[in-house]
Image (cartoon, rainbow, N blue to C red):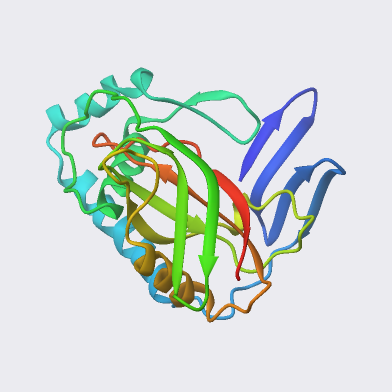
Amino acid sequence: MLIKWGSIVVKGSGKLGGHVFSGGPGGASVHTLAKARNPQTKYQMAIRARFNLLTQGWRDLTESQRESWYGAESEFSRTNRFGDTVFLSGKNLYNALNAQRLIIGLPILVFAPLPTLLNENIVTAVNIEISTSKIFISGFFTGNANYMVVATSSVSRGARSVNDKLRIIAIGVSYGNGGALRNRVEIYDGYVARFGEPKIGDKISIGTYAINSSGQRSTVYTVQAEFR
């Protein structure tokens, strides 16, 4: 749950007591939290496994290792959903950076890293072919780098806010010239594994974000695409 305090409360976002708070062009809203039909999917279980691994990892750190994370709190800033710049606590920073590293197959860092530059990440077009089972993503990327590919299930053409519906479907690898992503079949298969077989005409939001060796992640860049 994320709350922005004013004279009383000016904004709220997240879950609290069985309800979800959100905001958009039409104003603030609250609705009852719907319970997931299957809380034991392999994706949810993977998230829990990472959380448990990092929780135990933090407990096992030496005092000097923890101090390195406390000392790095001011080095890593991020922007929350309200557009405010925030800094994570040492423990939360350890969890956030290492969770991203685990996703791309890197080991857990016990000492805090230094911030490093993020790879270029701009999606300009997506071509999806059901007949060949391929999703081709073109844009401006750093050459020979990994990118997380995220997508939504079928959405209406006029849908504007989709960030809460994005799910990881694959890791794409950029070509040497940084103009597109490889692993096109794997990206398509990842979509099917996550959302099921698509139909011609289905419209989705799909995009990418970069994760660097320090565990920092870039802003998600998405476009709308249609299965053809």
Q: Measuring 37% from the left and 70% from the top, which residue is drawn there?
A: 45
Asked whether 206 or 217 is in front, the reply is 206
| Residue 39 placement (x, y as % from top left) | 50, 75
Q: Using the image, determine if residue 86 lies above or below residue 49.
A: above
Q: Quadrant of residue 47?
A: bottom left
Q: Measuring 68% from the left and 31% from the top, which residue is drawn there?
A: 4
Asked whether 192 or 110 is in front, the reply is 192
Q: Residue furthest right?
A: 26
Asked if residue 7 lies left or right of residue 68, the reply is right
Q: Using the image, determine if residue 128 lies above or below residue 213.
A: below
| Residue 42 placement (x, y as % from top left) | 38, 75
Q: Using the image, determine if residue 21 lies above or below residue 156.
A: above
Q: How many marks?
A: 0
Asked whether 21 or 106 is in front, the reply is 106
Q: Measuring 47% from the left and 76% from the top, which residue is drawn there?
A: 192
Quarter occupied by the C terminus = bottom right
Q: Quadrant of residue 19?
A: bottom right
Q: Measuring 57% from the left and 47% from the top, which residue is drawn there?
A: 222
Asked if residue 30 lies left or right of residue 98, the reply is right
| Residue 171 placement (x, y as % from top left) | 34, 56
Asked if residue 119 lies left or right of residue 154, the reply is left
Asked whether 11 or 208 is in front, the reply is 208
| Residue 5 placement (x, y as % from top left) | 71, 28
